[in-house]
Amino acid sequence: MAQSQWRKGDLKSVHERVTARIIERLEEGVVPWHSPHTATVGFPANYQSGKPYRGINVMLLAMAGYTSPWFMTYKQAQERGGQVRKGEKGYLVVKFGTYAKEVEDGLEEQRKFLRQYTAFNASQIDGIEFPEPILPEFTPSQRTGAAACIVKNMPNPPAIHEGRSVRTCYDPANDAVEIPHRSHFESEERFYKSLFHELVHSTGSAKRLARKTLLDNRGVSMSDKTIYSKEELVTEIGAAFLCAQAGIVIDDHENSAAYIQSWLRVLKAPSNQRMIIEAAGQAQKAVDYIMKAEPMR
């Protein structure tokens, strides 16, 4: 029988480095999951494979703030005839994977690993002609139209009741999203940002992804901050990813000092060193579900 576990002594430093980087940006007044670059430049992507980065790597690379979405490792650049310029600083990227290890009686045990490596942006590399980044400028109606399409095309969606309540929430018992009429919001883009937040919550339902942080939240005292905070972080990151897909930039006033301090308190807790990586991974799975994308590996 195959079993799965994390390798003993699994690169704790990776979690610590990632968390420290996120905390550093929060202390600078920047909310990493609200990066405008994913909405304007596009999601960071590996030039060698052509595939966009996912999960926590989206934040780690978007925080760099480059106008080109393309990144490569030092080795990949050399293989393509390029060279990272001397003195350039790379950016932390993480990779998840599994491997089979034979244990007693010929049984195999599936073990997980977490590795870190360094990526460089196209603007740091000489000798390769990268495609010029396309920076489309969408009108507000185009952005809200894209957001509406995301909502409309979500598979197995919850019921969405617009205008029945003055508060925004996801009701797991009835599998329904309650949201005020869009006229109550400062803009239609903010309406969709709030709706995306609740749709990400809804993906945790047992009939969808059965996310532990949503299921365990029911009946939990609000004094138990860990489960509640992690589910909220999943939805904040997931909603930000969906906004970026629609070209919606999160308003600066959402990055208030109180908002930032609340997340600093959570992420600085010694028991929460793994939270940001795990929450970003769960957020990516939620976005994949909503957009009917290939599940995250």
Image (tube, rainbow, N blue to C red):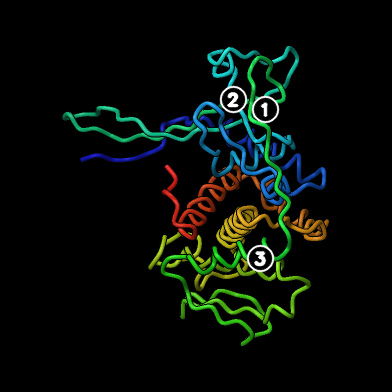
The 10 Å Cα crowd at callout 3, few under 14, some 14 to 19, many 20 or more, is many
Residue identifier under label 2: 72
Tag 2's secondary structure?
strand
**For the residues carrying marks 3 and 2, which lies nearer the camera in this image?**
3
Task: Please indicate, yes or no, whether residue 229 appears anywhere in the rendered image.
Answer: no
Residue identifier under label 3: 144
* Percent coordinates x, y for residue 20 in the rendering: 69, 37
Tag 3's secondary structure?
helix
Residue at coordinates 59% horizontally, 79% vertically from top-left? Answer: 178
Sequence-wise first label, 1 or 3: 1
User: Extreme left residue here?
Assistant: 105
Task: Please indicate, yes or no, whether residue 237 appears anywhere in the rendered image.
Answer: yes
Residue at coordinates 65% horizontally, 14% vertically from top-left? Answer: 127
Q: Which mark is residue 121?
A: 1
Residues tagged 2 and 1 counted as in contact (Cβ below 8 A): no
Q: Quadrant of residue 97?
A: top left
* Percent coordinates x, y for residue 67 in the rendering: 73, 36
* Percent coordinates x, y for residue 271 in the rendering: 59, 47
The 10 Å Cα crowd at callout 1, few under 14, some 14 to 19, many 20 or more, is many
- Alpha carbon separation for disc pair 2 and 1: 7 Å
Tag 1's secondary structure?
strand
* Percent coordinates x, y for residue 153 in the rendering: 48, 65
Seen in the picture, residue 291 relative to 157 is either above or below; the reply is: above
Quadrant housing the N terminus: top left
Seen in the picture, residue 7 relative to 194 is either above or below; the reply is: above
Q: In the picture provided, is 226 more to the left or to the right than 40?
A: left
